């Protein structure tokens, strides 16, 4: 368990989480990047450079 | 001058046929996003094209406040396609407008302001629908949006019951959350929403913009749960990609709706396309095909090294450990498969409902290959 950098709420990571993964804060919806897993460190995820979504 | 807002991609689409799109280069793409889920009958289904061409020769548009036979046919067709008891139809041009109208009608019919929506929800980008959309990235640059919206955890019936009270005008929910990551409503959740709105006099709005028109295996996803909302909203696949939204209401909502309007409401060209689309979806049993092919697709995807596979019918989400974006690029560029994201970690598959198991197998093979390429 770690905390959201945007709202401070608890954020749970998967047991097999890896650096570079993107997780959503379930409290505020912020998109967070896993920087490290031991101990867990999150940062606000960067915007996509090339968006293949909408 | 050039367009903006949409991200530019190095593919220019010029033609479509059934599940395929064709670029100006002649390259064939398998469209497993159905172009934002807008082509349930496939691209350019001959019956839809015939209906549009025929209508175009008669009347493209006349002032919407006058009657029109083509629009009347669609009203009847939509009422017969919708869950029982919902036979009051408001037509507009998009999903967000359908939800905007739903929120307005709920407020005027109840005389209340408060709206309860779900975390992870996506209901559109106009100021009311945007207010009921959860993610800050969609809203923050445009604040203030419509006030009075409270968010609860999706799927938590107790939290919903606690949030809804005699001040609540509406509860708005997606039967399967789409943009939020493809999350089907858990067993009993929509029934609980119907119960609490019935008890408090609030309106239950079900946003079926993505789930509707057969995508999840029934005409509307709420029918599989035996829930009939007070307001059902539809768009996307309704007119095979032509711009159409619908807000389908129970009598008490329609009777309480205040002034509302739209210049292009139910214009005959789009209405003709919609009636033909609904005829094809029903006549070719495409909802049933969605169930069959969707089950096969989910079963095959579950064999891949991914976090989760979930969905209903041909609305399927594949949650991956690393970002979905580069998988989508790999699918498109290397394997000529077009799909969509649902958030940053979910690949969303929403093919035309005409897709076959062979198409599904091709997509699973392509996804397996890009997953291997990304982890290599």
Image (cartoon, coloured by chain):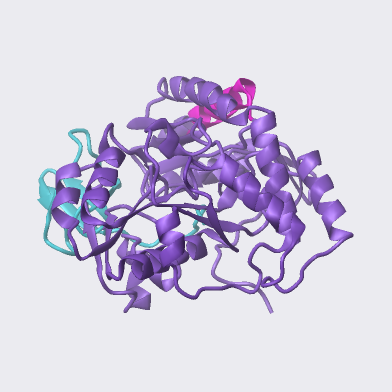
Chain colours: A cyan, B purple
- Across and down, in percent, residue B22 comes to 75, 45
Numbered circles on residues, count:
0
Q: Residue at x 26, y 57 (%)?
A: B201
Image coordinates of residue B65 in percent, x first then y, are 67, 72
Quarter the N terminus of chain B occupies: bottom right
In the image, the segment drawn in magenta is B355-370
Q: Position of residue B21 (x, y in %)?
A: 71, 43
Q: Which residue occupies the foreground of this view, B58 or B35?
A: B58
* Residue B284 position by quadrant: top right
Residue B185: in magenta span: no
Q: Would residue B158 appear left or right of B228 to someone viewing this image?
A: left
> What is the quadrant of the C terminus of chain B in the image?
top left
Residue under the image location 70 percent in, 50 percent down: B73
Residue nearest the viewer, comparing B328 with B242? B242
Which residue is rendered at x = 57% and y = 46% of the image? B79
Tell me if residue B124 can be seen: no
Q: Is residue A49 above or below residue B337?
A: below
Q: Residue lying furthest right in this view?
A: B57
**Res. B34 image quadrant:** top right
Q: Is residue B296 above or below residue B174?
A: above
Our reading of the magenta stretch's main secondary structure is: helix
Q: Nearer the viewer, residue B27 or B298?
A: B298
Say if residue B40 shows up in the picture: yes
Q: Nearer the viewer, residue B127 or B205?
A: B205
Within the magenta stretch, is there residue B365?
Answer: yes
């Amino acid at each position: 368990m770690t905390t959201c950098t945007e709202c401070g709420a608890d954020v749970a990571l998967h047991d097999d989480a890896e650096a570079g993964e993107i997780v959503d804060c379930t409290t505020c919806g912020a998109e967070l990047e896993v920087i490290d897993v031991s101990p867990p460190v999150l940062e606000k995820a960067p915007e996509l450079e090339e968006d293949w979504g909408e | 001058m050039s367009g903006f807002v949409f991200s530019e991609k190095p593919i220019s689409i010029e033609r479509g046929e059934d599940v395929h799109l064709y670029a100006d280069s002649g390259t064939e793409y398998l469209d497993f996003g159905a172009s934002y889920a807008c082509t349930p009958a496939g691209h350019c289904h001959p019956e839809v094209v015939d209906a549009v061409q025929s209508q175009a020769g008669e009347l493209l548009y006349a002032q919407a406040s006058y009657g029109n036979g083509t629009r009347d046919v669609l009203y009847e067709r939509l009422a017969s396609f919708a869950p029982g008891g919902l036979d009051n139809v408001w037509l507009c041009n998009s999903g967000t407008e359908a939800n905007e109208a739903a929120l307005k009608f709920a407020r005027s019919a109840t005389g209340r302001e408060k709206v309860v929506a779900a975390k992870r929800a996506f209901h559109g980008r106009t100021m009311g629908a945007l207010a009921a959309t959860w993610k800050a990235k969609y809203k923050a640059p445009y604040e203030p949006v419509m006030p009075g919206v409270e968010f609860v955890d999706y799927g938590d019936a107790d939290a919903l019951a606690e949030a809804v009270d005699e001040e609540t005008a509406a509860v708005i929910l997606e039967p399967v959350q789409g943009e939020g990551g493809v999350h089907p409503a858990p067993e009993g959740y929509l029934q609980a929403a119907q119960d609490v709105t019935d008890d408090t006099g609030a309106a239950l709005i079900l946003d079926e913009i993505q789930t509707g028109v057969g995508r999840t295996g029934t005409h509307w996803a709420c029918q599989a749960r035996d829930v009939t909302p007070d307001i059902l909203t539809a768009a996307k696949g309704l007119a095979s990609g032509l711009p159409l939204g619908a807000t389908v209401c129970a009598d008490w909502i329609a009777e309480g709706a205040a002034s509302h309007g739209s210049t292009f409401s139910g214009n005959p060209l789009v209405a003709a396309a919609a009636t033909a689309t609904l005829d094809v979806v029903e006549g070719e049993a495409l909802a049933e095909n969605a169930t069959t092919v969707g089950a096969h697709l989910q079963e095959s995807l579950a064999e891949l090294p991914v976090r989760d596979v979930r969905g209903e019918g041909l609305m399927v989400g594949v949650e991956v450990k690393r970002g979905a974006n580069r998988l989508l690029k790999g699918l498109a560029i290397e394997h000529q498969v077009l799909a969509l994201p649902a958030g940053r970690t979910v690949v969303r598959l929403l093919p035309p409902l005409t897709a076959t198991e062979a198409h599904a197998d091709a997509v699973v093979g392509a996804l397996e290959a890009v997953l291997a390429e990304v982890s290599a």
